[in-house]
Image (cartoon, rainbow, N blue to C red):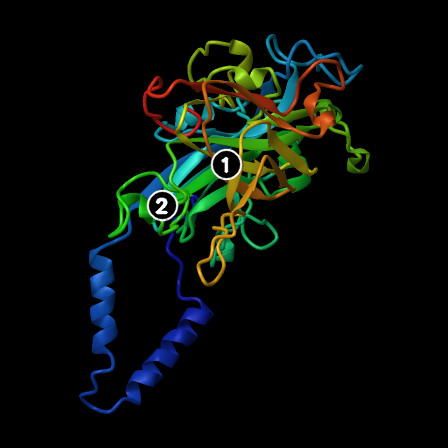
């Protein structure tokens, strides 16, 4: 935790290790050079440290909005406790990087869903500080929070974010996680404390690890690649990411009203892309720190609208942190699946195992990396083939997990500044 800075004495394990090391050195013959080479290697590594990226997130609760035109769910939604302009209680993360302690504290009760999208370079040291601000609506709940990087091969259990094996951050405290991603791809992060509840309540986000191939190789120029493919087959011009989740309004109501949920009754009310249900998925990106174009979506700032130029290669990053399988479909466009669960689809001999389809299955806890070439100018639908996932609270008309791909004539749109831009 951040306020535990007093150096500790040697542990029994460290003391034994030191004693064993000393005994080993005593057994070496005089003048032995065994120790010199490791020292030289250590000095060389220390002289060229890995780049470091630091991020500060805060965990708290708050209020967001599902589409106002959806039919009400008596008693449970819209929540009568919700402030004006919102209708659903949530938990979530906020990006508070660079804020003063007072500014961080002021974010209590302003949860964001989905969580901020994070982007890191392969083989960069990552430090993610997590502050637990507590719950403004439920001060009686003293839940801790964690950051679990789903699918990441973390060699140090202390930083894995599973509280049974590592550390949960109590209210009013901080903890800094350390990661060094060695494998590019699409990952997810979530709170693993009371994980069924906290994931359902909105503590989910996406993160991407960019390959070193982006810097160029002997055979490939600098550019944007999904993986270290070696042949340029994962090159793309624009990228868009979708966190797929389900929202059970009854559970959110019960958390806000100090009631207990029976999770065996699970029946989603809304199906979301990046924390929004259609038609809100089409609204532009916002900034939760400033007055947005649509105040109702202030704490759901990530758009799912895909915009591109005809002929461009578009990377779609899909992640599912709901509890149901989903089938993402785009009629009239061939989709090439190049990655699954942060792994390039190649055999051990290097043979591509890419799959070409127009429907991509994705289960809970899974991710997919998909590339397509934008067709002629026009508007195309991206949607879940499960029709139950295309409604808002069971009402008529389109809703849920659907968005649009708007293709402009070649050369119309300027280069993309970042994911989902």
Compared to residue 323, the image places residue 12 above or below, namely: below
Q: From the viewer's perspective, tell me whether residue 341 is left or right of residue 266.
A: left
Residue under the point 41% across and 50% down: 181
Query: Residue 10: x, y in percent?
Result: 40, 66
Compared to residue 102, the image places residue 345 above or below, namely: below
State which quadrant residue 135 falls in: top right
Q: Nearer the viewer, residue 133 or 392?
A: 392
Mark yes or no: residue 161 visible.
yes
Q: From the viewer's perspective, tell me whether residue 325 is left or right of residue 2.
A: right
Residue under the point 56% across and 38% down: 319
Q: From the viewer's perspective, tell me whether residue 333 is left or right of residue 49.
A: right
Q: Nearer the viewer, residue 100 or 75?
A: 75
State which quadrant residue 210 falls in: top left
Q: Are marks 1 and 2 in contact (CB under 8 Å)?
A: no
Q: Quadrant of the C terminus?
A: top left
**Residue 317 circle label:** 1
State the residue position of label 2. Answer: 232
Q: Nearer the viewer, residue 359 or 102?
A: 359
Mark yes or no: residue 140 visible.
no
Q: Nearer the viewer, residue 329 or 282?
A: 329
Classify mark 1: residues with Cα within 10 Å, few (<14), some (14-19) or many (20+): many
Query: Residue 110: x, y in percent?
Result: 53, 21
Q: Secondary structure at mark 2?
A: loop
Residue under the point 53% across and 36% down: 335
Residue under the point 24% across and 52% down: 218
Query: Residue 13: x, y in percent?
Result: 45, 71
Q: Rounded to the nearest whole Å, what is the CA distance between mark 1 and mark 2?
A: 18 Å
**In the image as oriented, which residue stretches furthest toward the bottom?**
29
Query: Residue 411: x, y in percent?
Result: 33, 20
Q: Secondary structure at mark 1?
A: strand
């Amino acid at each position: 935790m951040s306020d535990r800075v007093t150096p500790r004495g040697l542990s029994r394990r460290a003391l034994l290790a030191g004693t064993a090391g000393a005994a080993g050195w005593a057994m070496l013959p005089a003048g032995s050079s065994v120790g010199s080479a490791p020292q030289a290697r250590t000095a060389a590594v220390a002289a060229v440290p890995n780049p470091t990226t630091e991020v500060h997130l805060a965990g708290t609760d708050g209020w967001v909005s599902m589409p106002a035109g959806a039919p009400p769910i008596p008693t449970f939604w819209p929540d009568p406790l919700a402030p004006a302009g919102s209708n659903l209680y949530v938990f979530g993360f906020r990006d508070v990087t660079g804020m003063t302690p007072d500014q961080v504290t002021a974010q209590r009760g302003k949860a964001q869903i989905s969580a901020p999208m994070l982007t890191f370079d392969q083989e960069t040291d990552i430090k993610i500080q997590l502050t637990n601000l507590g719950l403004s609506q439920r001060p009686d709940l003293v839940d801790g929070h964690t950051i679990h990087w789903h699918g990441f091969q973390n060699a140090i259990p202390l930083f894995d974010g599973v509280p049974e094996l590592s550390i949960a951050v109590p209210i009013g405290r901080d903890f800094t996680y350390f990661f060094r991603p060695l494998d590019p791809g699409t990952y997810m992060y979530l709170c693993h404390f009371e994980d069924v509840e906290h994931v359902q309540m909105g503590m989910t986000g996406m993160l991407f690890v960019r390959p070193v191939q982006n810097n160029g190789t002997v055979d490939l120029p600098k550019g944007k690649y999904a993986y270290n493919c070696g042949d340029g087959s994962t090159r793309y011009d624009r990228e868009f990411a979708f966190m797929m989740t389900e929202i059970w309004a009854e559970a959110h109501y019960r958390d806000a009203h100090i009631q207990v949920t029976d999770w065996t009754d699970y029946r989603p009310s809304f199906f979301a892309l990046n924390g929004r249900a259609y038609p809100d998925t089409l609204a532009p990106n916002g900034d939760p720190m400033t007055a947005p174009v649509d105040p109702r979506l202030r704490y759901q700032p990530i758009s799912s609208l895909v915009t591109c130029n005809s002929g461009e290669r578009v990377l779609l990053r899909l992640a599912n942190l709901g509890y149901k399988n989903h089938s993402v479909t785009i009629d009239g466009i061939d989709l090439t699946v190049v990655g699954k669960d942060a792994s390039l689809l190649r055999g051990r001999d290097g043979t591509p195992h890419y799959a070409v389809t127009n429907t991509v299955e994705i289960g809970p806890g899974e991710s997919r990396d998909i590339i397509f070439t934008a067709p002629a100018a026009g508007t195309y639908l991206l949607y879940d083939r499960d029709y139950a996932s295309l409604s808002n609270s069971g009402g008529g008309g389109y809703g849920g997990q659907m968005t649009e791909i708007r293709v402009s004539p070649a050369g119309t749109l300027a280069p993309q500044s970042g994911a989902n831009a």
